[in-house]
């Protein structure tokens, strides 16, 4: 009798596995969504649906549909598909620059209400149309994995700050913080590149940050664990790598508000074009990098005060240190007039290659 029970259990598990595989084979999994403006008030949604073929690279296919309101896009896409479409495998959601400048609040509402979309899904703004990016052909793993990997490795190893659906929505709803997203662009027919950041005021993109300024932005919002920067000293140049940084803002005044942002940075001098590296040259590099950081960070601060956006989260920090914080007063008078100082402390730990 016990043997019969094991046989029945084995048959049940086998049949259960067959049913599950049949269900998966009968649906189409969306791994990426793109949103662009369309005629009138409609929004065009483009779904990226990969086909995994044995011993071959992923075949990328797309379906597009225009609708208003945006919640109907998914239903309209279903009408164009021979199999049911599900969004439980989403890796990326892309917003064309045109629609990002008009506002994406309705799209955010739809995305966060879908329980099948994970909060680690990457969001990005496209310099161009999201549809054009999704219809490309990038690598063997499929377009959505390519774009997700692009964002992930630029975050972990280079200058892109942490960002995904969770962090974006947290910043979107946070008092004293403006959200931002990676800005990407199609590069030829076979690639996508990170070209900077898209900066939001509420749900609209109103400014961008070029890729060559990402280093200074990241210093102001989170700790560095890797990355690098080129230091210019007249005719000479130095390259500092393996950076580590600490961010220590300090509220030094409240009437009016005054803030000092202290940045401590350590790094490896990888390259120097000025000949032998002696103590004097090392001091010059330290001083040049310190000045470069302070100047560029202050330029960002002043620009954002003028634009009435706060992607650095200075308002959130001040709010955490202020009783009875008045958000309306902060945005109208306190933030634009606040005195902000950036103080960088540089330490080069060792030397690498010297030219």
Image: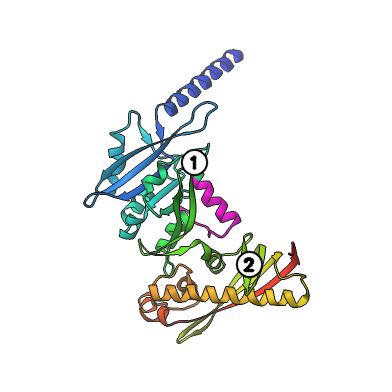
Q: Earlier in the sequence, mark 2 or mark 1?
A: 1
Residue at the bottom extreme? Answer: 255
Say above or below: 210 vs 299: above
- Crowding at dot 2, Cα within 10 Å, few <14 / some 14-19 / many 20+, comes out as many
Residue at image mark 2: 245
Q: Where's residue 140, x and y in %?
A: 53, 36
Q: Observer-nearest residue: 311 or 46?
A: 46
Local SS, label 2? strand
| Relative depth, front residue between 279 and 340 | 279
Residue in the image at 49% along x and 19% along y: 15
Instruction: State the residue at coordinates (66%, 77%).
Output: 287
Figure disc tally = 2
Image quadrant containing the C terminus? bottom right
* Vertical position of residue 75 compared to residue 8: above or below: below
How far is mark 2 from mark 1, CA to CA?
Answer: 34 Å
State the residue position of label 1.
138
**Left or right of 60, for residue 294:** right
Image location (x, y in percent) of residue 193: 49, 52
Numbered range of the magenta stretch: 147-165
Label ID, residue 79:
none
Disc 1, SS: loop
Q: Position of residue 148 (x, y in %)?
A: 50, 47
In the image, residue 235 above or below residue 223 = below
- Residue 262 in sight in this render: no
Q: Which of 5 and 222 lies nearest the eye of the viewer?
A: 222
Answer left or right for 180 relative to 55. left
């Amino acid at each position: 009798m016990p043997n019969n029970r094991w046989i029945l259990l084995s048959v049940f598990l086998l049949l259960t596995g067959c049913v599950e595989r049949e269900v998966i084979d009968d649906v189409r999994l969306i791994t990426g969504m793109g949103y662009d403006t369309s005629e009138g008030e409609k929004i065009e949604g483009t779904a990226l649906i990969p086909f995994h073929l044995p011993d071959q690279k992923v075949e990328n296919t797309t379906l597009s549909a225009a609708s208003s309101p945006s919640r109907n896009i998914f239903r309209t896409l279903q009408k164009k598909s021979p199999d049911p479409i599900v969004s439980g495998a989403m890796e990326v959601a892309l917003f064309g620059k045109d629609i990002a400048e008009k506002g994406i609040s309705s799209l955010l509402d739809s995305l966060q209400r879908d329980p099948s979309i994970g909060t680690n899904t990457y969001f990005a703004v496209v310099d161009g149309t999201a549809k054009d990016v999704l219809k490309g052909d990038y690598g063997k793993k499929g377009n959505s994995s390519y774009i997700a990997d692009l964002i992930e490795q630029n975050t972990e190893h280079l200058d892109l700050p942490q960002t995904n659906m969770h962090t974006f929505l947290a910043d979107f709803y946070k008092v004293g913080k403006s959200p931002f997203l990676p800005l990407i662009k199609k590069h030829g027919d076979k690639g996508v590149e990170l070209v900077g950041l898209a900066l939001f005021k509420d749900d609209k993109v109103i400014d961008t940050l070029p890729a060559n300024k990402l280093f200074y932005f990241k210093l102001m919002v989170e700790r560095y664990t890797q990355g690098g920067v080129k230091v210019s000293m007249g005719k000479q140049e130095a390259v500092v790598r393996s950076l580590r940084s600490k961010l220590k803002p300090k509220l030094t005044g409240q009437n009016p508000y005054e803030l000092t942002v202290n940045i401590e940075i350590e790094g490896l001098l990888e390259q120097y074009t000025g000949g032998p590296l002696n103590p004097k040259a090392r001091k010059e590099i330290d001083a040049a990098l310190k000045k470069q950081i302070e100047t560029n960070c202050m330029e960002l601060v002043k620009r954002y005060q003028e634009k009435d956006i706060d992607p650095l989260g200075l308002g959130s920090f001040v709010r955490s240190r202020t009783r009875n914080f008045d958000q309306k007063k902060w945005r109208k008078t306190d933030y634009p007039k606040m005195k902000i100082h950036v103080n960088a402390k540089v330490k080069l730990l060792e030397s690498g290659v010297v030219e």
